[in-house]
Amino acid sequence: MEVFLGGVVEQSVQLFFLVIFFIGVAIVFLASEIGWRLGIRTKGHGASGNISALEQSLLGLLALIIGFIFLMALMRFEARREAVLNEANAIGTTALRARLLPTPHREESLKLLRQYAQIRIMPAGITFAELPTIVDRSNQIQEALWQQVKALSAKDNNMVPTGLFIVSA
């Protein structure tokens, strides 16, 4: 449920910034139109140099704002990419360590890890209505893996493979 609420909040924040951007663009165009109309009115008075400087400064400010927007989008993309890479590495490490476990637990743990990886690779057509069921299934798989760890640690005295698996799970 936390992931679902985070997605809704994330979309509302994106919508808020999109609305702010369009309001800013409208203000710039409105200011440009007002300046152009004032420039036509004062054409014979020699004030066109001031209007041109104002227009250039507004365009410079707009370029700066667009640059900050691209920087924020790039930082967000990098953070998401890093999170996906960290999770993929964690799943891979857990799968490698699961191969060290004794036979009955090894197959079950690897099967659960395959299911978990398939769930985490979401297809593009997933809707928000389906997201809570996916998150619930992911939590169930994590709980099943933890139950495997508990059962293994209770009956296995060989703590090196079991301990490594416990740390990664």
Image (cartoon, grey):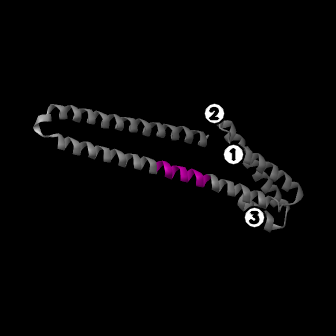
Which residue corresponds to the image point at 85% horizontal and 53% vertical from the top-left?
A: 107
- Where is residue 138 shown, x and y percent of the image? 71, 44
Residue at the disc numbered 3: 164
The residue range painted magenta reads 72-83
Q: Residue furthest right?
A: 103
Answer with left or right where residue 104 lies relative to residue 117. Answer: right
Label 2 belongs to which residue?
A: 127
**Residue 74 located within the stretch drawn in magenta:** yes
Give the structural element (helix, strand or loop) at label 3.
helix
| Residue depicted at x 52% and y 38% | 11
Q: Earlier in the sequence, mark 3 or mark 1?
A: 1
Asked if the stretch drawn in magenta spans residue 131, the answer is: no
Q: Quick one: label 1 or label 2, which is nearer the N terminus?
A: 1
Q: Position of residue 2 (x, y in %)?
A: 59, 42
- Indicate the position of residue 93 as horizontal and vertical percent values: 73, 60
Residue type, numbered disc 1: Arg
Of 124 and 135, which appears nearest the observer?
124
Q: Which residue is mark 1?
A: 120
Mark 1 and mark 2 residues within 8 Å of each other at the beta carbon: no
Q: Amino acid at mark 2?
A: Thr
Q: Residues within 10 Å of mark 1 (few under 14, many from 20)?
A: some
